[in-house]
Image (cartoon, rainbow, N blue to C red):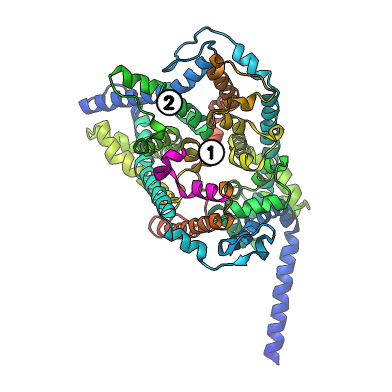
Amino acid sequence: MLMNNISARSNAKQKQSLGKRIWRYRYMYLMLLPALTAMIIFHYVPLYGIQIAFKKFNAVAGIWGSKWIGLKNFQRMFNENTFLNVLRNTLWISGLKLFISFPCGVIFALLLNEIGNLRLKKVFQTVSYLPHFISWVVIAGIMRSVLSLNGPINQLIELFGGEKVYFLTKSSYFVPILIISDIWKGMGWGSIVYLAAIAGIPVELYESAKIDGASRLQCMFYITLPSIMYVVAIMFVLRTGNVLNAGFDQIFNLYSPIVYDVADIIDTNVYRVGLINIDFSYSTAIALFKNVVGFTLLLVVNRVSRNKLQYGV
Amino acid sequence: MHNKEKGALFISDKILITFSYCFMVLFSISVLLPFWTVIMDSLSGSALKSGARLWPEEFTFNAYKSVLSQKTLLVNYSNTLYRTIFGTILCIATTFFAAYPLSKKNMPFNRLLTYLILFTMYFSGGLIPQYILYKNIGLMDSRLVLILPGMFNAYYILVMRNFISEIPAELEESAFLDGANDFVIAVKVYLPLLLPIFATITLWSAVALWNEWFTAMIYIQTQSKQVMQVLLRRMLIEAQLAALYDDGTTVVQQTEDAIKAVTIIITILPIVCTYPFAQKYFIQGLTTGAVKG
């Protein structure tokens, strides 16, 4: 009886204090309201529609009224060569970007650090950011004309006696073009984090190394690189969590049916299956697969990053 | 800084420095050259047979005159402006009023709300559930679809929250004791201290909205509501130059390249002219971990 009384009181007290605390923060919740409303509408309500991945979507019946078909869409995914090819393309393109374009940001930062003329350094830096600010629509548009049969690249090839190549329609050239243009667009911007890390290295380290007779190359490999390795590791780990995003904007604006065999990635496939073929359920199933795998990957990566690098949520 | 000193002692140093300069010069050229040829195309009056122009041929401003007198272009350009201006204002206001409460660790449900926001960065319903939703709530072919979905951005909120967290709490407490409510404190005490991060997020949001094309492409059907990026996509990627000339004007073949070039230039001009002077703000926030628990 007594115990009951005490627990009831403490419960009441706790409730009251939580209520009071909420009341104290009432204006805060009011301020949060627009963001939370938009978040629920644009990010949480669509989760309700995921169920059509397990249904045969019927526009008249709607999301709720459509008939359940279980895992049929997912079975279809793994029975169709198209999807397996799309998955392979996604991982291949993403992997190449991770292992080739990702290190370019680090290299760019190291090389820029060797530029002694501060004015020039600033100019190089500013120029290198330019492609980052231009949309893939514009860049792909320019690339299409540069790489066209009459474009400057083919003119050079012809000048040296080579055969003209219609680059963007050749499967063997398409992926290298993706990687090179990805490096071109992202290298300067990607170096920012490392430049900031380099700026934080104590000058004394370099001074004492110089006294000991170290060359700049040695300084680069034994002071600069190790000092920023932690940041590089974090960026790398974060990027691996994103491996299913192979670059929709870039590929969508550069590809054509003729190179689908190497260029079609999950995101482009989801778009075409859903909005061109109007196969809503199947498209949603593919997107759900990507989201679940991607999210799991992120949790793993975050755990690794938190435990090994003390960086994470 | 060690790299201010000119005299290199080692041969390896000379090679390294020479290589660095060569690399930077070549890379800069590779960035600038394509844009240079676009400018030259825009000023040329004759068709380009092959290769690229380093100088204008038959110098003329005709393409500019022609493009800038097209109603479609002016309407789509003002749509992009509308989207960028109102979308950014809405986004920055939403971001600030969400970030400020979330910076208060003692607020009940703070952690829960933060996780709910974080979750949106990593999991989504996918394209089709979004498509069905937008259709059902009347966003299809509505100008609102150009600005509303962008008003909530989890990343911006978390970056701003981290900045606010670094401001000493005494500031808030003394204002609170003076009887000001949280809203007044947020706007009168904190906001003036946050102008640098406001600039950052304003610029991020503005560039993102200016460059966005996918949402506009799939949800806007009426040409008079369309934005520049989609018009450009039709002209450059789908090779429908006529997209610009809906009034039936036929384009002379000679000026096709020039017309594309002019449209590219006027679309990227505002960003190209702004970013070199606002670099500091663009970069700020990139280097502070956005996702601190």
Residue picked out by circle 2: A148
Front residue (pair B109, A7): B109
Can marks 1 and 2 be said to lie on one chain? no
Against A70, is A224 above or below? above
Label 2 neighbour load within 10 Å: few <14, some 14-19, many 20+: many
Magenta segment includes A272: yes
Using the image, name the chain to which the residue with label 2 belongs.
A
Label 1 neighbour load within 10 Å: few <14, some 14-19, many 20+: some
**Residue at 47% from the left image edge and 18% from the top image edge:** B37
Quadrant location of residue A220?
top left
In the image: residue B55, left or right of residue B144: left
Kind of residue at disc 2: Ser
| Disc 1 secondary structure class | loop
Q: From the top left corner, tell me how far across and down residue B28 is, in percent.
A: 41, 24
Q: Which of marks 1 and 2 is in front?
A: 2
**Residue at 74% from the left image edge and 68% from the top image edge:** A19
Front residue (pair A292, A232): A292
Kind of residue at disc 1: Gln
Q: Give the range drawn in magenta.
A: A256-274
Residue picked out by circle 1: B284
Front residue (pair B208, B170): B208
Q: From the top left corner, tell me how far across and down residue B284 is, in percent.
A: 53, 38
The majority secondary structure of the magenta stretch comes to: helix
From this viewpoint, is residue A3 visible?
A: yes
